[in-house]
Amino acid sequence: MRSLAAVACITLFLVLSIPGVSALGGDEGWIRVDCNVNGASVYLDGEYKGVTSAGSLSIPVYTTGTPHQSVTVEKSGYTSYTGAVTMPAADETTTVYATLNPIVTPTPVSYGSISVSSQPSGAEIYFNGDYRGLAPLVISDVWPGSYTIRAEKSGYQAYSTTARVSSGVMTSVYCPLTKHDTSGALYILSTPSNSNVYLDSAYQGSTPITLNDLASGTHILEIDHTGYYDWKSSVTVPVGGTRTVDATLNPLPASTTGWIYVSSSPGGASVTLDGSPMGETPSSGSLKLNNIATGSHTVALTRPGYQPYSATTSVSPNTVTEVSAILQPTTTPSGTGGLTVASTPPGANVFLDNTFMGITPLTLSSVATGSHVVSLKMDGYQEYSVTTPVNTGAVSTVSAALTPITPTPAKSAMFPAAGLLALFLATLVVIRRKP
């Protein structure tokens, strides 16, 4: 009996000494860990089980044993994964998906800088709108990124650009400045055309006209035309551009009369116009003859003790014509005097007794006393002629308002031939009349 009991005890001891036989009962399953990184270490409840290969690791577990609670997957240079685990049934597999992300080591960032130059130098430099100084300059300690650089200088157009700054790098920015164009132009039209143009009181020509290279800013523009009210306005010349001015002039009221102002030295002379008495010249000033019909008129002056004076003058609508007479004593004095000749417009050729003397305005000295014929000639205007006296030691004045010549239509080509024929016939008549 004692030997049987000993055998039984030994047998029971051997059975109990076999690991897991009583606890596990022999049922087995698997926990599969899938990972995006090979070579990652896998732990079940903190106990190392192996490394992943070909994207996974399968771990055998006994289903009747103590259940596992968590799985941990880790690898140097990657973030670790820890998650709950579900125990499989016998002969089954549960899968755990573990994703490891690489640990990014931040790259150290350092400041950059901007070197700014300008042409011409000395421009004011603005960094994102903040003034930093005069070019050339260096803007230091600039964080990497994009910035606005603006350059300004008096007399030049502003320049703006974008500068991109990298870590530890100096960025160069060049600012070429363009000069302001301070001139402009005016293109001037008018109704009617061919009107006189004055800019800041200086004559420029006739419309239509383009005035170039004008200083920008405000100017005074005047336009006039015979028979129309003057047009006057301030105009602004744009910088680098052309402004068009279209001026419409308003016509003067229709008129067929003008004025004649008659003066004499000495005064007190009786004045007749075309033979009709008009009054006497005052001692100073002029005798004003109003509402005189346009055209040619003869003005005569008489005064006891003086030679009669006569002049032919032309009257234009709404225009004053002046007649200035220096009366000569009936006894002819000896000696010389002076003579001043003026015209409107100026620039007329002056002839004294058919001798060319110069261009108006003109003052002649040492002119023999007595009566002289003064003639004024100018292209585009009717010839003006007057007899004026010159007194010893005195200065006589002739002032003439020249009358424009009205253009006549061009004659046809047959008129020259007809004129030649008429001249030929007239010559024959003269020849026949000779004895």
Image: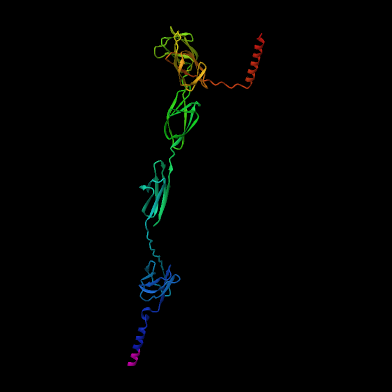
Where is 355 relative to 151, above or below?
above
Q: Is residue 238 left or right of residue 141?
A: right
Residue 4 lies in magenta, yes or no?
yes
The residue under the point 63% across, 20% down is: 416
Where is 130 relative to 48, above or below?
above
Where is 281 relative to 141, above or below?
above
**94 or 181: nearer the viewer:** 181
The quarter holding residue 412 reads top right
Q: Position of residue 31 (x, y in %)?
A: 41, 72
Q: Quadrant of the C terminus?
A: top right
Q: Position of residue 427 (x, y in %)?
A: 65, 14
Q: Is residue 417 left or right of residue 259?
A: right
Where is 221 relative to 327, above or below?
below
Residue at far left of view? 2
Stretch of the chain drawn in magenta: 1-7
Q: Quadrant of the N terminus?
A: bottom left
